[in-house]
Amino acid sequence: MPVEHSFPDSASRDPKGEFETEKMSISMGPSHPSTHGVLRLQLELDGEIVTKADPVVGYLHRGDEKIAENMTYNQFVPYTDRLDYLAPLANNMAYAIAVEKLAKLEVPPRCQAIRVITAEMARISAHMMGLGAFGIDVGAWTVFLYSFTEREKLYKLFEELTGARFTTSYARIGGVARDLPEGWAGRVDAFCDQFLPLLEEILSLLTRNKIFTDRTQGIGVISKEDAVAYGLTGPNLRASGVPLDLRKDKPYSGYEQYDFDVAVGSKGDAYDRYLVRGEEMRQSVRIIKQAIAKLPGGKWYAEDARRIFAPPKEKVLTSMEELIQNFMIVTEGPQMPAGEVYFEAENPKGALGFYIVSKGGGVPWRLKIRAPSFCNLSILPKVCVGAMVSDVVSILGSFDFVMGECDR
Amino acid sequence: MPKALDAIAALKGRWAGVSDRASLDQPAINVPAPDLLAVLGSLKADHGFDMLSDISGVDWGVGASPRFTVVYHVLSTTGHEYVRVASDCPVDASPEVPSATAIWRGADWHEREAFDMFGIRFAGHPDLRRILMWDGYPHFPLRKDFPLSGVDTDLPDLEVVAETKTNAIAAPMAGGPFVAAPGQINMTEAEPRAKDESWNERRPKPGA
């Protein structure tokens, strides 16, 4: 078990004040390998122990919400790729469902199943990345090499499906961009089959690794109450023992048809967060295999999404009606009813929410993105206090955040 | 009857100012700013809405009154239901609502963001400063009167400004954005910058 640091303890260690030292302020980041992007932590240290941590975010702020107010609903889909850029397929889906709620669109079962498959694949690739990076943060290089090999196989499949490896922009409002390529589902199934034993192998590099357990067990403990009070979501919340998973509790896109378990931790430390992610990948494979086994036929877009979708190109060039429709959709955007909707999807990092205020027309009046990484990081000032500097690295790794999403 | 509706009925009975809000999905209420903390506290303590999902500011446009609204989405982690609570800021010139940090500690960063983007102040917030933009940034970017291209502003580090003679400049829009308000006015009026091609990446802004 790790050493318990009692803090503040300078008085007991040094009753006469002979060795009193000044507290030191250091800036960790924004370009520090353990901050996974551009997070800056303003740390105040007493020796090796953190007495105050102030995360400085916003280095990757691109004004996505302002941009959204100035473009049509369709045009914003590619911007959602750049939120959690490790799981763009899941972001696309969350945004599409939010707008479909506004437009009162029902997508057909095949489209729902395709979205579930891609979102769960995105979850595996995001967790693979998170796991590899976490391993590097605490000194285990090998995990990264294995997990990136698996992630690469997924990206090959994404490329085949969407034409892009990272910025997929696959979901459309009322459907997906195109149907599955021939034989693609079979290849995903084959990937799952070979992935499961490899996943066990990857996890076995860490789960009982003495160095890894020493650096994660009892580190960065978050209580159930704190996790809920700070609005943590996703694996970070479940590691603290709160069994909230929106796929189970507020099912969307047909998640209620699939049989899967929700991984829940008991201690809420960095090690639990790692375990929860590992189990989530096993469950994702289960979901993907079920979805492929009963993949429904039929349309992969909603019939009444015609007023949102741009019509097929050959029709635009040959038919007057489609030409006009294409022109209207491009210049004025798909016409939406006025009103407000809020939708949260269970993304790899947590609950990604979109709050859309529409005054009618093709452009949102206000589009708020509720970023899970942003909420998850807000607990850092509490968790880091009393930890050693090297523990901060381990805590950050276990949080598995993405700054593109945090800063928007 | 779902729990969220029960909760809303109880809240409406207790506070006369609470009224239904139009919504396309989950139950929603309007709460006057003076009652806001009491209503949010009651939602959490009496009705089990223990998690604050999101706080969002909304600007209804220059000239609208009330101009600013703060929208809370609260979630029950056991009942799995959302409630939307909206509160208009009473004074348009200096929008302010009470801070919910005492109820949910997670409100801290959400309120800092709403302050950063809209200039909405949260009375009682322990540390209300900018979060996404840098300290000392003089504008509120998500207000409707702030242009999409941005405005010329000094960089945060004045030493860098003195040395490099650079600052944050407005983005040349190169003719965009290409979206018009539907049906009412023509594109030049809807988005004047759409036709302003007098400056772009290659040609400097006139008068700059």
Image (cartoon, coloured by chain):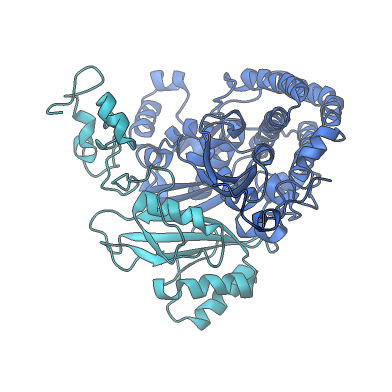
The colour one sees for chain A in the rendered image is blue
Q: Can you say whether B172 is above or below B12 in the image?
A: above
Q: Residue furthest left?
A: B207
**What residue sits 50% from the left and 75% below the top?**
B38
> Residue A89, can we see it?
yes
**Residue A190 relative to residue A313: left or right:** right
Where, quadrant-wise, is the N terminus of chain B in this rendering?
bottom right
Residue B128 spot, x, y in % from top left: 42, 57
Q: Can you say whether B22 is above or below A193 in the image?
A: below
The colour one sees for chain B in the rendered image is cyan
**Residue A118 relative to residue A326: left or right:** right
- The part of the image, by quadrant, that contains residue B151 is top left
**Residue A334 relative to residue A393: left or right:** left
Q: Nearer the viewer, residue B205 or B148?
A: B205
Q: Nearer the viewer, residue A53 or B173?
A: A53
Q: Nearer the viewer, residue A366 or A5?
A: A5
Residue A295 spot, x, y in % from top left: 74, 33
> Residue A362, can we see it?
no
Residue B66 spot, x, y in % from top left: 30, 64
Where, quadrant-wise, is the C terminus of chain B in this rendering?
top left
Residue A359 spot, x, y in % from top left: 36, 52
Q: Nearer the viewer, residue A34 or B200?
A: A34
**What residue sits 50% from the left and 53% below the top?**
B109
Q: Total number of numbered labels?
A: 0
**Residue A125 relative to residue B114: left or right:** right
